Amino acid sequence: MTDDISASREFFDKMAASWDSRFKAGEEKLAALNILCPAPKGGRALDIACGTGVLFPMLLSAGVSELWGVDVSPKMLDEAKRKFPDPRVSLFCGDFLGFGETGFDCAFIYRAYPHFHDKAAFAKKLHSVLKDGGRFIIAHNESRQSINERHKKTASHVSDILSDAKTEAKIFEGLFDIDITADTDYLYVISGRKI
């Protein structure tokens, strides 16, 4: 395990027990996320850096046949497992770059993208796990400024500073058709389909 992964694992393990009470997703923003990147009924969905499973209710209620959650923190995944004993849910503890499943219809990276330091490797791996035409969405339920300020104060050792969405989206060029970007006081989004 690399030093970056070890530091992230330690950081998020410490926060797992209080995560859900400290960070609220906001139902209206999750509904918007589901509109922008709907999980297909009967499809396969991937939640990268899933934490305690904040997106799981939305994805399961959409009727996915299979939902994978990936996270480096075993304690976060323990919380997700406790909350969601649904047989459609499978969990992988480790670095996303080492995840072996493929053939997903959609992939979500919710409130986690700054924690992936090698963005080019992340984009290539994301491309490899999705079906042709599969969609990914990077989303935050707050502004880039808020994210960057918080990470500078409390998580600079496990996160990078976000660039504006259009600049950040260039990392995915050639692998995805990026058709949605938003960088507002309300949210931050990059989304596209595998080409």
Image: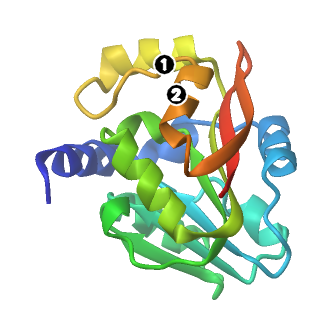
Give yes or no for contact between labels 2 and 1 (Cβ–Cβ under 8 Å): yes
Note whether 107 is above or below 99 in the view shown: above
Q: In the image, residue 83 lies at what x, y percent?
A: 59, 68
Residue found at x 63% / y 73%: 104
Left or right of 11, for residue 193: right
Q: How is the image coloured?
A: rainbow
Q: Amino acid at mark 1?
A: Ser
Q: Amino acid at mark 2?
A: Glu
Query: Quarter of the image containing the N terminus?
Result: bottom left
Q: In the image, residue 11 lies at what x, y percent?
A: 27, 42
What number is the disc on residue 65?
none
Which quadrant of the figure has residue 96? bottom left
Q: Which sits earlier in the primary sequence, circle 2 or circle 1?
A: 1
Query: From this viewpoint, which residue is outermost toward the bottom?
Result: 87
Left or right of 10, for residue 52: right
Query: From this viewpoint, which residue is outermost toward the front?
Result: 174
Left or right of 195, for residue 155: left
Q: Is disc 1 placed on a helix, strand or loop?
A: loop
Q: Nearer the viewer, residue 87 or 136?
A: 136
Q: CA distance from mark 2 to mark 1?
A: 6 Å
Note whether 160 is above or below 40 in the view shown: above
Count residues near mark 1 (Cα–Cα under 10 Å), then give few for <14, some for 14-19, many for 20+. some
Query: Quarter of the image containing the C terminus?
Result: bottom right
Count residues near mark 2 (Cα–Cα under 10 Å), then give few for <14, some for 14-19, many for 20+. some
Q: In the image, residue 147 lies at what x, y percent?
A: 50, 20
The residue that disc 2 covers is 168
Residue found at x 58% / y 59%: 53
The residue that disc 1 covers is 163
Q: In the image, residue 40 lies at what x, y percent?
A: 83, 70
Q: Is disc 2 placed on a helix, strand or loop?
A: helix
Q: Nearer the viewer, residue 65 or 183?
A: 183
